[in-house]
Structure formats: structure tokens, C-alpha cells
Amino acid sequence: MEPDPQEHRGGISRRKFIHLGLHSYAGFQLAPPLLGSLAFLEACSTPVKTIHGACYHDCPDTCSWTVTTQGEKVTGFGPNSANPYTGNSLCSKMNFFPQEVTFHPDRILTPLKRVGPKGKGTFAPISWEQALTEVATKLSTIIQEKGGEAVMPYSFAGTEGLVQNNAMGSRFFARIGATRLARTICGDAAFAGVNAVNGGSTGVLPQDIIHSRYIIFWGTNPVLSNQHLWSLAQQARKQGAKLVVIDPFLSQTAAQADWHIQLYPGTDTALALALINVILAEELYDQAYVDKFTTGIAELRTHVAAYAPDTVAAITGVDAAVIQQLAREYAQGNPALIRVLIGMEHQANGASAFQAVAMLPALTGAWQQLGGGLLHFTFDLFGEALNWERITLGDTLQNPATRTVNMVQIGRALTDPALSPAIHALFVYNSNPAVIAPNQNLVRQGLEREDLLTVVLEHFLTDTARYADYVFPATSQLEHWDLLTSWGQTYINLNQPAIPPLGEAKPNSEFFRLLAAAMGFTEEYFGESDVEIIKKTLDSKHPYMAGITFDYLQEKGWAELQLPRPWLPFAEGNFATPSGKCEFVSSQLTAQGLPGLPAYRPVAYSEEEIKTYPLHCLTIKSTCGFLNSSHANVDRLRKEEGGPVLDIHQQDAAARGIVDGDSVKVFNANGVVSATARIRRKVKPGVVCLPQGFWSSLVAGNASANALTNDCLTDMGEGAALQENRVQVAKG
Ligand code: SF4
């Protein structure tokens, strides 16, 4: 983008003016010493308003917030402390959200058209009308000449708000018969594993962790990524709970646990099956619960005979005695809770790991106690509670025969000469595939195609937006309506616009309405407003929604689902599987011709591969400041993070002549990433760890963690096996 000329004339640019006029949530002060008495009088007569909203991020917390405004100025921003779950704090990423996103001086506030080579980020402003006309004309030609499937949307959870996420976009893409996108990059493998056992993913409610007395955080780092659950876990610990963390990385949570069990990456399935082996062998299971509410115990017993502690110790790197002690303590934990989230799903064996872990609470009968069981997703509860018809209309309108492309493999989809029809138009919104998708160099190669029309809806010139032909300015959460459910807790939030859209920004929903009009589409469903969609979605007679109306939410901002208490979903069986029982041998999987029991199936690397790339590389959410790739352009957070850091074991570092603080190159056949070596006993020998989320355009070497990852899929759920990477590391 061109620099703002005013910046260089000793004056103050419009953007900087807006920036200076905004104050942090902490102050709630009125803006700058007001300029003269007239302005002062105007300010005094402008009413102060408090508007409710909620965080839109792909985060289990879904914090409620309030925004204070005076006229079009934001004068205060902070947590809505009335919400008993999200309480008095947002996270450090979001404390300064108005300044660091909405009013950020680099925010895109007008449509842009590319004027230089793809990837260089050179654009010129263009009017909405002209940009829409040009996009609609090009799109119509592509559809006419190549067919609707030559068009592909690419979006994920850049906003969790139901309307701006995809309510209108999905209608548009269904209308043109676009390629369908399998949005499976995160969560689907985990769900597939737990669903095979329990018939759904809902288990213990997060607020009930305070009743737990033995807590296992398995492959999750709530200190960083689930702060309100972490607070509640601290309450449980004060009341005597023991906290165990199972993680190949010494995460911030592992560092604060009572016991960190550090296994090799990708071996969770073996560890879980070994725990079952011990629990059965030592008769630590709940015979009555197993007899009444489970199926397949005999097959499970036979199956886990191959996972004796000694055998599994060699696989996991965890001593047999530790495996036995963990099994005993867990089985006798009273109540015992296992919290699973994202970490262990992104491996080739990821869904099987979830399937194996999900069996443990039924085996021990933990489901019978408040605070006992498995704590996973909560989105099934909202799935039951709301009227989803207007949100999922796009899915309903889709032709099921239309082809599907998996979002994990966008690089392949954009470069595969055999794909017919090839993708000729790509619409990216709520996502940044040049950073978050695996095999980054292949993704970029695809985005560089001159014959690809790329349209991006964004706040900033992200790595992906730099490749766009057209960038349209999207509104931030302070500027649009939305309704937020949660996959990590049980509160629903209404997000109300606190200020009018800045510049020429428009909500995603409005972009698709306008593009539909420019294409000449006249279907009534394109005319539905955001508020109408929200009101219809809330119009549910489900008992969980008793008393929760649009008016109620407008007044208060948030509401808790009206769930029966105490919440003990499987105390008396009632699993949502075909048998109604917890299925150790999954009938859903056997019906699909798949193995009914989970097994540890490591990826078979050749000797040559292991010799060339001897280290297993985890690409994890180890940064405090970024959420996936969001906020990675914010100066404050970039300074806090520094550049990408590679955690490496002393032994592996010494073998390469690397000392703490050295610049290193991490590489494999996919790419090369520059990082700074950190030798702090955070990983085992043979394992290195690299943080995700950095924008390639803002770091040395112009590549970030996904330059090293493969686009292979998980064993079930078609998720991303992002953690299945081998690399070499060298100084330099
Ligand atoms: S990113 Fe998560 S913890 Fe931070 S404010 Fe948003 S919902 Fe809350």
C-alpha cells in the first residue's frame, strides 16, 4: 500500500488521528484534552453508551465484553464482569483490541485492487461499486466457461460469530454451485474419535472442573489457550485436586502441574491403551458401570494385551512404572477428569488417540460423579438449543453432488494439473491460508497463479491478502452484529455494533449480499438482514433456551444455556451411540468397514528419511500473543514474542554445534524456517518445537512454521496431521 502522504508532511494523518483519539479499556477516560470550548460542549452533550459484545476468536473461552462509546468514539473497552464464567478478564491478546485491530493504523478501510506482482502486496484503492462490478464480471465468465466448481471459498473460524462466519457466504457459494470446502483443519479428528465411543463430544461442563480431584490436561495448554478454565482448575487444586499434564512439550501449563508426563509426539494412543491395560489387569475398573452401560469389554481386554506398560514405555518414552502409577491414580481419582482439546489430534494417529482416551471415564465409572468424566467440546449443546435453519441454509441449498476439496490440501488443489475443473476463483474470508495451511510453499505457489482470481475479505494485508487481486475491507467485531455460541463453554452472546463501520468497511454478510446483487441474483434469502438471521436463530423452543431472547441478550449481552443440573450426562448410560452405551468397539466405525478399536499405528518412515531428517518437529501454539495468525502484525505482541524460537534438546543442539540463542535454520523437503535456538529442557531428545502463527512477510527468511508441515490427513475426521513432520536443524 502507498504510504499516507500526510505522515511525511509533519502533519497528522487521519488514521493516526483516529488512533490517538482512542483510549484503552483500563482508563475509560475521555479522549485528549479537548480542543476548545465548543468541542468540549459537544462532547458533554453526546451521550455515553455501553454496548455489549463478545470475543470472536477461535478460542474456547468466548469472553463477554462491554464497549463504552461517546458518539462514534470508543472511550472504554473491557470484560463484561457480569458474566460469571468469563468474569473480569480478557486475555493479553485482546485487552487493547480497539487500538490494535479496529483502529490500527494499518487497517484496510477501502477496497483495493492489485497493481503489482502477486505476493508483493502492491495495491491501489478502488470504489466498492467498481470492484464489485469487476469481480462479478470475472466470476460470471469463469462460471460460464469452466463451471461453478471452478470457484472455491476458503474460510474457517477467523470469526466464531455465526452470521459473519458464513451465514451469507455459504448461500452465495451454494447458489453458484462452487466447490464445497471440507472445513476440517481443526476439531474434526478429535470429534471423530470421541464420537466413536460416546456418540457425541459433550461431556463434563467446564465449570464443573471445580469438583474434580484428579485432573489430567492431555495435550492442552490452558494457561495459554483456555484461561478461564485454568482459573477454575486452580480453585480445584486449592481444594486438593492433583493436576497432571500429558504433553510432549514442557508447556506453560506443564510447568505449573503437579506431574508432567512427557511422551514422544504421536504416541498418545499407545499410552491410553496402556492405561486401559493396567486398569483392567489390576481390576481397577468399575465392573457394575461397565456391565450396565458399555459394550465390547471382552474385545477391549484382548486388544490392550498388546499394550503392556513395558511395551508402551519403549514407544512413548514414558517409564513403565510411571504408566502404572498414572493408571492407578487416575482410576482411584475421586472424581477424575480428563481434559482434551486440540494438541493430540494433529497427528496421523490423532482420532484414534481421542477414541482411546474417551474410553477411560466409562471404564472407571468416572461419569457417575460431578467433575468426573471427559471434558471436550460444548458445541453439541448449542447444536441442540438453537434454531440453525438460517445459519445452515447455505448447506441446505448445496447440491450434494458438487465436489469437495479439503481445506488442509489447498496447496494441492491450487496446483494439481489433474484437478478438473481447476480452481480459477478463490474467495478467502475469516482465514489466512498462506500462514495457517500446511505446506506453505505449495500454497504460495498456488496463490501466485496469474490465472487465479483471488478475492480476500480482511482487516489487514495478511500474507494471503498480499496475493489477492481484490481485497475488500471487513468490519471488526466492534462494527457489526453477530451471535456467538461457544465450543468451550455454555454461554451465548449477542455482539452489537458499538460504532459505525470505519472507512468503507462492510460486514462479510454485506459483501456477499452486494456481490449476489452484482451477479444479478434475486433470491429472497440474499435480502435477509443480520438481525433477522440472529432473531430467527434465537427463535427456539428448546428448554436450554428458556428465557433467552433477542431482547434479553440486547439488554444483558450474554446468557447461560439453561441446562439441567447437576449435569451428569452419562451417569446412567444414555450415550448417543447406536447402542445407547459407551462403545469400546465402535459400531459406527465397523459399519463403515473401519476397525472398531483404536490402535497405535505409527507413520513408517524409511531409514533414509530418518537419517536425512532425524528430528520430529512439533508446530505448536506456544506464543502468548497470537491466536493462530491473528494479531501477528501487532507491534506490542510482536515485541513480546520476539521472533520464532526453536526449542531443541541440549543433546541435539550440541551434536550440531548449536548453543542457546544461536540463529538456526530448520528445514526439510518442504521448506526452510529461520529461528533462534532455545535450550531449556522443554523437549525430549529427537524432538524440536516451533511456534505457529508468525506471518512470513514479517519474519526473517520469509517463511513460518507451516513451511515445514505436510498436508497429510488424520486417521479419521480428515483433519490436519500438522504434527507429523521430520526436519533437520543447522546453525546459521
Ligand atoms: S481470545 Fe479467548 S481468552 Fe482472549 S478475549 Fe478472546 S475469548 Fe477471551
Image: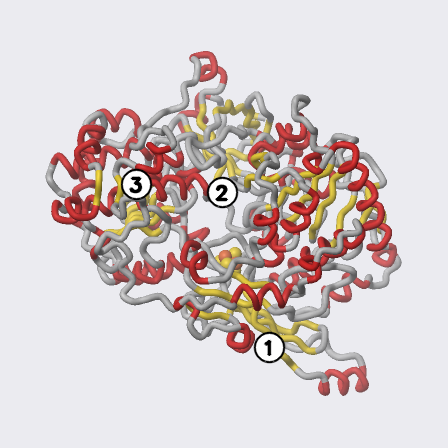
Ranked by sequence position, the earlier of labels 3 and 2 is 2
| Above or below: residue 239 compared with residue 354 | below
Residue 227 visible somewhere in the drawing: no
The residue carrying mark 2 is: 186
Ranked by sequence position, the earlier of labels 2 and 1 is 1
The residue carrying mark 1 is: 50
Q: What residue is shown at x 38% (from left), y 27% (from top)?
A: 685
Q: Look at discs 2 and 1 and give the one toward the viewer.
A: 2
| Residue 608, image x, y percentages | 46, 12
How far is disc 3 from disc 2 in space, using C-alphas? 18 Å
- What amino acid type is highlighted by mark number 1? Thr
Label 1: few (<14), some (14–19) or many (≥20) C-alpha neighbours in 10 Å: some
Q: What residue is shown at x 57% (from left), y 21% (from top)?
A: 669
In the image, 345: left or right of 583? right
Q: What residue is shown at x 34% (from left), y 46% (from top)?
A: 199
| Above or below: residue 372 compared with residue 708 | below
How far is disc 2 from disc 1 in space, using C-alphas? 35 Å
| Above or below: residue 635 compared with residue 588 | below
- What amino acid type is highlighted by mark number 3? Val
| Residue 323, image x, y percentages | 22, 36
Callout 2: SS? loop
| Above or below: residue 696 compared with residue 29 | above
In the image, 599: left or right of 493? left
| Residue 152, image x, y percentages | 67, 39
Which is nearer the eye, 19 or 336? 336
Residue contact at pointers 1 and 3, CB within 8 angstroms = no
How many marks do you count on the picture? 3
Residue 273 visible somewhere in the drawing: yes
Q: Which mark is residue 357?
A: 3
**Snapshot quadrant of residue 705:** top right
Which is nearer the eye, 485 or 216? 485
Which is nearer the eye, 394 or 299? 394
